[in-house]
Amino acid sequence: MSMHASPEIAVVIDHASLSVNVDLVERCVRQTLARSGVSEAEVDVILTDRSLVLDLNQRFLNHDYPTDVLSFRLSEGEQLAGEVYVDLDTARERCSEFATSFEAEVCRYVVHGVLHLAGFEDHTDLLRAEMRSHEDAILTDVFGSTPG
């Protein structure tokens, strides 16, 4: 690995009817990694549907409920490798609730998932608030202002 290795990012759209700008999603991942101090990474983002995210949540986390994003860290140590699964159905349904665009809602889920890969947690109110603050800052970097 060179000292100036850049993250390897793959974005896969695996949904029957919904899609999002792949370059935008990749920018969200790069900005999240940069703000998290991660320079070497392999991240796959799978933009998919509710049924796959629910299935993964049940099979791997024993959570029998839908969720908007799942992250799986596939490495330990300095080199970060992981997968982020985003539920496009939930993003489509909830974007109006937050007065934001579909793409901005998808990007928030992507950023949230990548922050988890980078080691951020959200299991307390304080950690959730800190994570939300990081998300807002990253989305501002990507969109020029915080969407929604």
Image (cartoon, rainbow, N blue to C red):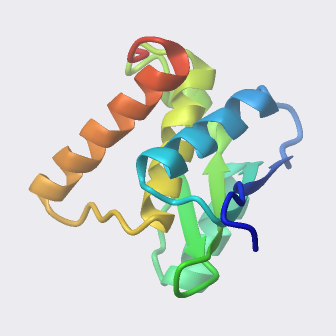
Taking the image as shown, residue 121 lies to the left or right of residue 35, namely left
Of 87 and 132, nearer the camera is: 132
Residue 65, x across and y down, in percent? 47, 65
Q: Residue at x 54, y 39 (%)?
A: 31
Can the viewer see residue 67? no
Residue 28, x across and y down, in percent? 59, 37
Q: Residue at x 68, y 57 (%)?
A: 4
The residue furthest front is 3
Taking the image as shown, residue 121 lies to the left or right of residue 25, namely left
Q: Residue at x 57, y 34 (%)?
A: 107
Can the viewer see residue 42? yes
The residue furthest left is 126
**How many numbered callouts?**
0
Q: Residue at x 46, y 64 (%)?
A: 118
Residue 76, x across and y down, in percent? 54, 87
Look at the image and tell me in which quarter the C terminus lies. top left
108 up-or-down from 80: above or below: above
Residue 8, x across and y down, in percent? 77, 57
Of 14 and 3, nearer the camera is: 3
The residue furthest bottom is 76
